[in-house]
Image (tube, rainbow, N blue to C red):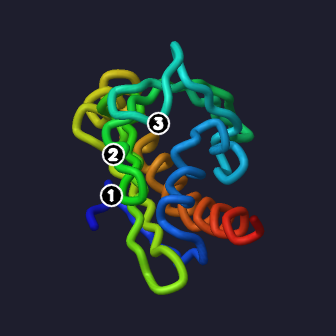
Amino acid sequence: MSELSYAESVVVACPPEALYDMISDVTRMGEWSPVCRACWWDEGGGPRAGAWFTGRNETPERTWETRSQVKAADRGREFTFEVGGAWIRWSYRFAPLDGGTQLTETWTFLPPGIARFRERYGDQAQAQIEDRTAAAHSGIPTTLAAIKKAAESG
């Protein structure tokens, strides 16, 4: 993986479809993510390609909201969305295993997102990109562990 893409996997004792249903319900993302506090579907959306949702994120330094668009919603296989429609991609892939699912979460900082950060932050863009990259590297294992715990505890 490149510096601007990162993935980790965990095995969850839960069928892929049930795990997909849990994760594609973005209203639950605040239960697992160390940064996202809440998400809600925009304009009657739902877990389908093309739908938009808003997320509220918090760190000690700031609070902000983003809109994301679902890019893939294939029950039991993949749930992918892109922040800003094309800035940062978050993807969850589900691979069936005996007695469960291998869940892989992937984060990718996309070229339009890099361009947006350069425009918005100027000389500070690289530092901002590095901060977001570090947050993904530390946040993904935390999120996966929380999803695993929630799925396996019923």
Q: Determine which residue is flagged by label 3.
A: 47
Q: Compared to 29, does 93 lie above or below?
A: below
Disc 2 and disc 3 in contact, CB within 8 angstroms: no
Residue 7 sits above or below residue 53 on the image? below
As measured in the structure, the alpha-carbon distance from the residue carrying label 2 to the one carrying label 1 is 6 Å
Report the disc number at residue 46: none
User: What is the quadrant of the N terminus in the image?
Assistant: bottom left
Is disc 1 surrounded by few (<14), some (14 to 19) or many (20+) residues within 10 Å? some
**Residue at the disc numbered 2:** 109
Q: Earlier in the sequence, mark 3 or mark 1?
A: 1
Does residue 131 appear left or right of residue 84 in this picture? right
The 10 Å Cα crowd at callout 3, few under 14, some 14 to 19, many 20 or more, is many
Q: Nearer the viewer, mark 3 or mark 1?
A: 3
Residue type at mark 1 is Ser
Residue type at mark 2? Phe
Q: Give the label on residue 5, or none.
A: 1
Residue visible at 56% across and 59% down?
A: 18
Query: What is the C-alpha distance between the residues marked 2 and 3?
Result: 22 Å
Residues at discs 2 and 1 in contact (Cβ within 8 Å): yes
Which amino acid, by three-letter code, is at mark 3?
Answer: Pro
